[in-house]
Amino acid sequence: FTLTAPERFWSKVNTPKDSLCRNWTASTNSRGYGLFSINGKLVYAHRYAYEESNGPIPEGLQIDHLCRNKVCVNPAHLEAVTAEENMRRWHVA
């Protein structure tokens, strides 16, 4: 049988005992963000996780990792924000 996209996705995630993060364990890009292949297209793992949980990312917004862990795909750790807000948060962290 064939796994659904969500089943394939979550099979590549590890939740460490000492963390609330859900860490992506498959491929990452040069900047450390997880990559997931769906319908022959590579997408960011954190964006896929956000959309699976919350629906489409609103136009003009980015997904911020509230936990500051680039491989985290826990929807509770992801928030849609403006590019300016995302940059501000990363520089404050």
Image: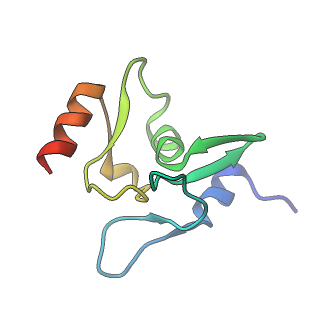
Q: Is residue 85 above or below residue 16?
A: above
Q: Residue furthest left?
A: 92
In depth, the one of 27 and 9 nearer the eye is: 27
Residue at x 45% of width, y 42% of height: 50
Q: Is 38 positioned to the left or the right of 13 in the image?
A: right
Q: Is 76 positioned to the left or the right of 88 in the image?
A: right
Q: Position of residue 72 (x, y in %)?
A: 40, 58
Residue at x 71% of width, y 44% of height: 38
Q: Is residue 10 above or below residue 5?
A: below
Q: Residue furthest top?
A: 59
Q: Residue furthest front?
A: 30
Q: Residue furthest bottom?
A: 17
In depth, the one of 77 and 54 nearer the eye is: 77
Residue at x 35% of width, y 65% of height: 21
Q: How many marks?
A: 0
Q: Is 31 positioned to the left or the right of 4 in the image?
A: left
Which quarter of the rendering shows the N terminus?
Answer: bottom right
Residue at x 49% of width, y 47% of height: 49
Q: Which colour scheme appears in the figure?
A: rainbow
In depth, the one of 45 and 84 nearer the eye is: 84
Q: Position of residue 53 (x, y in %)?
A: 47, 43
Q: Position of residue 16 (x, y in %)?
A: 39, 78
Q: Is residue 14 above or below residue 64?
A: below
Q: Position of residue 27 (x, y in %)?
A: 60, 60
